Amino acid sequence: MRRRHTWMVLAGGVAAMMIAMGIGRFAFTPMLPIMMDHHLFSASGAGYLASSNYLGYLIGAFILTFMRIKNRSLLLFAGITVSIGTTWSMGEFHGLDAWLVLRFLSGLASATVFVIVTSIVMERLSALQAGIFYGGVGAGILLTGIAVPLLARSSEWVGIWKGLGLISLVLGLAAWYSLGGRNEGTVKASPSSNEASSSARRIMVCLTIAYGLEGLGYIVTGTYLVAYAKTVSNIPNMTSLSWMLVGAAAIPSCVLWSMIASRWGKKWTLSLAMAMQAIGIAVPVLIPNKAAIFAGAILFGATFMGITMLFVAYAKDLFPRNNRKIIGLLTTFFGLGQIIGPLIAGHLISGNGSYLSALIGAALVVLAGALSLPLGIGRADRLAKPIIPELPR
């Protein structure tokens, strides 16, 4: 019975991640070239919309880092509802100002669902099940890659957004059935400890910086990959196909990276994953053909959620209690990087009409993050002991 309950919680977590992250957050990527074809906004406008979403994500994560939560189920319900509503409303409202507000609220909902669902689900899952849980983001991306071209056959961009909203509603019902009402109550404070290892704190600083660099670099590809793919090849549905590859590669990635980390350790595994992602970002613009686009999409999909999982798991190893606050802290710096990335990239693309400088710059930022981990942490990870953080409630 307990095993059945665990798998129900896992299924609900996957559905929630598909709604808030795979659709609510990333459906904008395959929709971007469609909306730009209708001259609804420019590349810089797309950057503002992306950054508005990530500003909401940043604020949501920051608030949750310090907020005392009395009822996680209620907050989860609010996050899922807002995510569904903002996805639908992207087709209901017209104009950049309205979309900026909607993307901001969508980002706020994404952070809420990510942090709350992760804190709920990760309390009950094995390492393998955790990999499946994070694969929900990839499943949502794959779903958008399939749904967008199918909906586009019978609808304009307005109908596509509303169709995605209806899909989110169905997933939302499944998520709430599995998770709702099972996790109410205040999360009690854990006893504090003054035996804070300086090595553990040093590692946490390095993780925070590297995760911020990852947020800044990866999101440029997460925003503009599909739009760039359309400039390289005229293959029908090239944009959707490249995005489907991202999702398909992301689904098993967390399980695979977890297996690698169990042998190599999280520090070196993170460095490898980020270096591979940097290559995946740079290759499509250095070798502008469809094979490079597909390779870049696969490398991007195979790394971005695995990197997120490993950062969270690494931090939780150091600070095993009050993990919601640690997740919120990491997500805050990640979100800050995500705001900066699209703004800079959007202006670079609009200014010179090329994706080259934006994507190469993003690749270098991610590579810097990859190098900062072994250089910054050094041997501290061997000396660090798990500690209970004294974080404000």
Image (cartoon, rainbow, N blue to C red):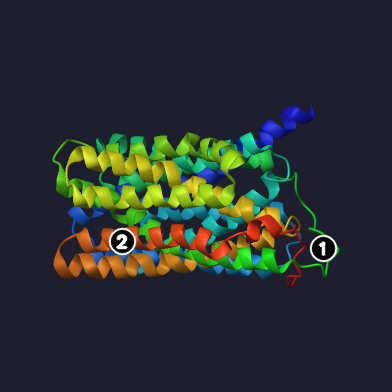
- Give the residue furthest to the right: 191
Instruction: Identify the element where label 1 is drawn.
Output: loop
Residue type at mark 2?
His
**As drawn, 78 above or below 212:** above
Measuring 34% from the left and 61% from the top, which residue is drawn there?
364
Instruction: Identify the element where label 2 is drawn.
Output: loop
Measuring 17% from the left and 47% from the top, which residue is drawn there?
288
Residue 157 position, x and y percent, is 28, 48
Measuring 64% from the left and 65% from the top, which residue is drawn there?
64
Residue 113 position, x and y percent, is 58, 53
Q: Which residue carries the number 2 mark?
A: 94
State which tag comes first along the sequence, 1 or 2: 2
Residue type at mark 1?
Ala
Numbered disc in front, either 1 or 2: 1
Q: Which residue carries the number 1 mark?
A: 189
The alpha-carbon separation of the residues under discs 1 and 2 comes to: 45 Å
